[in-house]
Image (cartoon, rainbow, N blue to C red):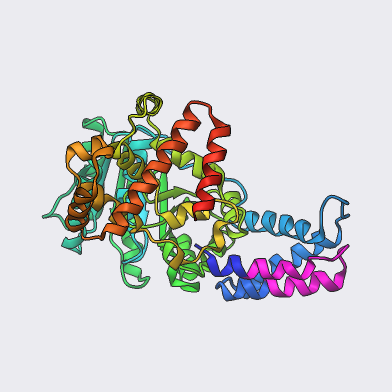
């Protein structure tokens, strides 16, 4: 996300590289490039100008330490101001109430229904809540069906009244149902329109007034540019919602409008959607997002994702197998599946400092498919004991997986080298591991 903005900001800081100190001239030149990068990313002119004026004022007032270069100082100031623009501190979702009621609003096509299911999954998996999804869109039968399908995917009950055309009554009945069935949280998915209109606003306002939700979240498609800001303001003027959700952030290389919503409506961004999978929902942390925009990565979020997929019991079993040299293709496949559950490869790479320069063509989220196909074409005995994979078996596996013998041989070689490194790390043989890595580099 924000690839274009990241690249242009990095280029703007090069103006200060090699400079011994900050002057009004070189700061002005740098900030001209920063402002241009923000405008190209669809940040409004007023906000881009206000931001760069603040950065200039802070930069010229700074004393440069001998250990810090002017470009490093400028990156720090820009980072802090970007984080502040996006809200400064993270704001948690309000789950007080029995049940806690969350009202979802937004235009048609913004991703409300998908987000509702993602949020239900998040609250169930990470907050240990029992959730009820409510189909409050009485105009599109497909919306009710979609929510039912998504509810099944995340194993969350969906409340519907297919014969009712009264969304206020549906919401009230759903909350009563939740109380009687021990549900902690009620998420109400409401109807959207192709554009803001009076009927839509009256309806959502009536639902909010009647059910008095703990949270009203406005869902906005990040790819709609400055229209996203205008729509966010129109909804806020009527609903005074509690937070913003940015969807489809993974599909937009500009995304600057998303940065400016917070400064226009003065409400925090609480979640960002980064794909179609039900797990592809991130809590929004302004400082972490600023890190990623400036190419500093987001190690904290990466570690958190890894911890969510970490199974202590499985790790102990794996360690024992490695120590006994019993690591096999079934174990290898489990490790791949754990990585896949963490999110898209491109998104994970962006969390590693310096990896933001990797282009779309360098990262293929389907890279694991051929590996899974090859392992899937092995017999149970071959997966358990890779040593029996002779030439004829490899040829059969290649035909069965739709690959070729070169790919099969490459995977087996990678598996062998990975096994050796993992075993050495487990048994504390760091010196041997370094020797092995050196040998691998020479072979390449």
Q: Residue at x 21, y 40 (%)?
A: 382
Q: Residue at x 52, y 55 (%)?
A: 350
Q: Residue at x 27, y 34 (%)?
A: 183
Find residue 217 and report its horizontal and vertical position in percent. Answer: 41, 52
Q: Is residue 129 left or right of residue 12?
A: left
Find residue 432 and report its horizontal and vertical position in percent. Answer: 54, 34
Is residue 59 in sight in this rendering? yes
Q: Residue at x 56, y 48 (%)?
A: 298
Asked which quadrant contains residue 7, the reply is bottom right
What secondary structure characterizes most of the magenta part?
helix
Q: Which is more toward the observer, 219 or 289?
A: 289
Asked which quadrant contains residue 385, the reply is top left
From this view, report whether residue 312 is shown above or below residue 261.
Answer: above
From this view, report whether residue 261 is shown above or below residue 156.
Answer: below
User: Residue 166 colored magenta?
Assistant: no
Q: Residue furthest left?
A: 163
Numbered range of the magenta stretch: 8-34
Q: Which is more toward the observer, 276 or 237?
A: 276
| Total numbered labels placed on residues in the image | 0
Q: Is residue 207 left or right of residue 319?
A: left
Q: Which is more toward the observer, 52 or 373?
A: 373
Q: Is residue 34 left or right of residue 270?
A: right
Is residue 245 in sight in this rendering? no
Find residue 34 and report its horizontal and vertical position in percent. Answer: 68, 70
From this view, report whether residue 433 is shown above or below residue 18.
Answer: above
């Amino acid at each position: 996300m924000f690839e274009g903005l990241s690249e242009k900001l990095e280029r703007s800081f090069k103006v200060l590289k090699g400079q011994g100190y900050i002057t009004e001239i070189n700061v002005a030149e740098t900030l001209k490039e920063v402002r241009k990068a923000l405008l190209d990313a669809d940040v409004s002119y007023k906000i881009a100008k206000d931001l760069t004026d603040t950065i200039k004022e802070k930069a010229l007032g700074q004393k440069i330490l001998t250990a810090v270069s002017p470009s490093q100082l400028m990156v720090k100031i820009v980072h802090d101001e970007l984080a502040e623009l996006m809200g400064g501190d993270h704001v948690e979702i309000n789950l007080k109430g029995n049940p806690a009621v969350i009202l979802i609003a937004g235009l048609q096509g913004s991703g409300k229904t998908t987000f509702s299911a993602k949020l239900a999954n998040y609250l169930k998996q990470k907050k240990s809540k029992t959730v009820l999804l409510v189909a409050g869109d009485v105009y599109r039968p497909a919306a009710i069906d979609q929510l039912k399908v998504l509810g099944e995917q995340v194993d969350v009950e969906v409340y519907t009244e297919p014969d009712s055309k009264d969304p206020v009554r549906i919401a009230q009945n759903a909350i009563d149902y939740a109380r009687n069935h021990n549900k902690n949280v009620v998420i109400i998915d409401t109807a959207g329109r192709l554009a803001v209109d009076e009927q839509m606003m009256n309806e959502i306002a009536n639902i909010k007034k009647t059910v008095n939700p703990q949270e009203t979240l406005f869902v906005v498609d990040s790819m709609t540019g400055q229209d996203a800001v205008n729509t966010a303001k129109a909804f806020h003027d009527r609903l005074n919602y509690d937070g913003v959700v940015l969807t489809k952030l993974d599909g937009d290389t500009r995304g600057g409008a998303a940065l400016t919503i917070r400064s226009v409506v003065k409400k925090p961004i609480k979640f960002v959607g980064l794909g179609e999978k039900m797990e592809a929902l991130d809590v929004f942390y302004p400082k972490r997002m600023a890190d990623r925009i400036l190419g500093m990565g987001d190690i904290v979020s990466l570690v958190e994702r890894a911890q969510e997929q970490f199974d202590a019991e499985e790790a102990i079993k794996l360690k024992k197998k490695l120590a006994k040299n019993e690591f096999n293709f079934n174990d290898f496949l489990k490790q791949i599946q754990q990585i896949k559950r963490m999110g898209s490869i491109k998104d994970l790479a962006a969390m590693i400092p310096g990896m933001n320069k990797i282009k779309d063509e360098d990262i293929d989220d389907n890279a694991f498919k051929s590996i899974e196909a090859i392992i899937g074409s092995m017999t149970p005995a071959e997966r358990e004991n890779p040593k029996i994979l002779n030439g004829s078996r490899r040829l059969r596996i290649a035909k069965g997986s739709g690959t070729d013998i070169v790919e099969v041989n490459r995977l087996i070689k990678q598996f062998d080298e990975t096994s050796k490194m993992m075993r050495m790390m487990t048994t504390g043989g760091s010196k041997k591991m370094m020797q092995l890595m050196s040998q691998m580099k020479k072979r390449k």
